Every structure is written in structure tokens, then in C-alpha cells.
Image (tube, rainbow, N blue to C red):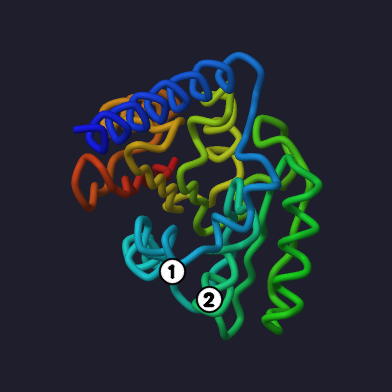
Amino acid sequence: MTFYIVISLLLVVLVLANLWWRWVSRRHSMPCPTFFAGALESPLMNWLISTQTTLDRIGLRPGQRVLEVGPGPGRLLIPAARRVLPGGEVIGLDIQPGMIERLKARAAQAGVSNLTPILGDATQSHFPPDYFDVIYFCTVLGEIPDRAAALHQCQAALKPGGLLSITEIFPDPHYQSRTTVQRLAESVGFQLQAIHGSWYFFTANFVKAYV
């Protein structure tokens, strides 16, 4: 009986901590902290959010120019860089200097030369219009206080016909439902292409319409 009580209390604590982080981060712009980078690279994280499955759903191809918003230490971006070869390049835009340094180090260690880390805010303009073939987020959109502004920047930076891909997993503290993701993307002009997966781990793909 004592064992079940302890487990129940731990679950309650985890749920409350999850809700607290979600509430605080929405009000004070708290992205996943740099000290958590090691956990993002762990086999457990890859099991929860399969790198191969996520990249397959995005559908990267050789020769593409790709942006990941909030790449952290590069769990997805480094293998993405390999997928767009030959001729392609990837850019990682992250607001945290510590994550950018971690990404640079891991890319160098992996021998990836077509990856460029950039320190910056996703709600600000950093790139020319019609620049990218693909822009993707993975469990990051909910960390951005002004999500519509970030998606407006994606709309401007994508080529006509370009792909916006958003992956979410429950119970991430910043989890965005499929309905919320679709509403936000369509509100800035994207058109739904497909949603892959179930509600607890899905990838929603949208296209920028040709004018």
C-alpha cells in the first residue's frame, strides 16, 4: 500500500510541476533550459519523439534549404543536415546562447558542415523573403509567447509552395493540440497539407500558397 501511495504522490508532483512550468513559461518566455540539453539528446527522448519518424513525416529532400526553429542541441537538425545532401543546407534559430554553443559543438563533432546556428528570436525577421523550402518546429511552438508573430515570420521566409511542419507530443509542458496548431497556422495564411500520427504525437504539415 505504501508503494502505491508514493507512486501516486510522485505522479501528482509531476503533474503539478508540468502545469506550473506551462503557466510560468507562457508568461515569462521560458524555453527549455540549456541545462536540460543532455536529456534532449538521450535515448529516452529519441524513443518518445523518434527522430527518424519525425524527419520522415517532414519529408526532407536533397538540395533543400531548411530552418529549424528552436533546435536545441541538434537532435533533429544534425540528421536533417545529412538528409538534404547533396546541395542542401540547414539553419538552426535558437534564442538561447547556451543551446547555440551546444549545437555548434555537436555539429563539429559529427562532421556536419552544411549547418549554420543563428542566435535570435523567432518573432523577429532574420531572413530574406521566400528563402526556405522547409521550416519546422518540434515541441517548440508553445514555448513562444507570441506564436502568431513567429508563424508570420515563417510565412514571410518560406518560398511559395514551401512547407511549414509542426510536431507536438503530450505531455510536453508546452503541448499544442492539433486543433490549436491548425488554427494558428491557418490564421496567418497557411493551408493544411496533412496531419500524421495520433493526438499525443503528431506532425502537422502546412503549405504556403502560391500568390
Whether 66 is drawn above or below 115: the answer is above
**Horizontal side, residue 12 vs residue 116: left or right:** left
Amino acid beneath label 2:
Val
Q: Which quadrant holds residue 41?
A: bottom right
CA gap between label 2 and label 1 equals: 6 Å
- Figure label count: 2
Q: What residue is at 35 percent from the left and 56 percent from the top?
A: 48
Q: Nearer the viewer, residue 211 or 48?
A: 48
Q: Quadrant of the C terminus?
A: top left
Q: Residue 162: percent from the left, percent from the top?
A: 46, 53
Q: Nearer the viewer, residue 202 or 34?
A: 34
- The answer to whether residue 76 is seen in the rendering is no
**First reached walking from the N terminus: tag 2 or tag 1:** 1
**Horizontal side, residue 44 vs residue 85: left or right:** left
Q: Residues within 10 Å of mark 2 (few under 14, many from 20)?
A: some
- The answer to whether residue 82 is seen in the rendering is yes
The residue at which mark 1 appears reads as: 60
**Horizontal side, residue 192 vs residue 88: left or right:** left
Whether 176 is drawn above or below 120: the answer is above
CB atoms of marks 2 and 1 within 8 Å: yes
**Horizontal side, residue 148 vs residue 157: left or right:** left
Q: Nearer the viewer, residue 108 or 69?
A: 108
Q: Residue 99: percent from the left, percent from the top?
A: 72, 51
Q: Residue 76: percent from the left, percent from the top?
A: 52, 63
Q: Quadrant of the N terminus?
A: top left
The kind of secondary structure element at disc 2 is: loop
The residue at which mark 2 appears reads as: 84
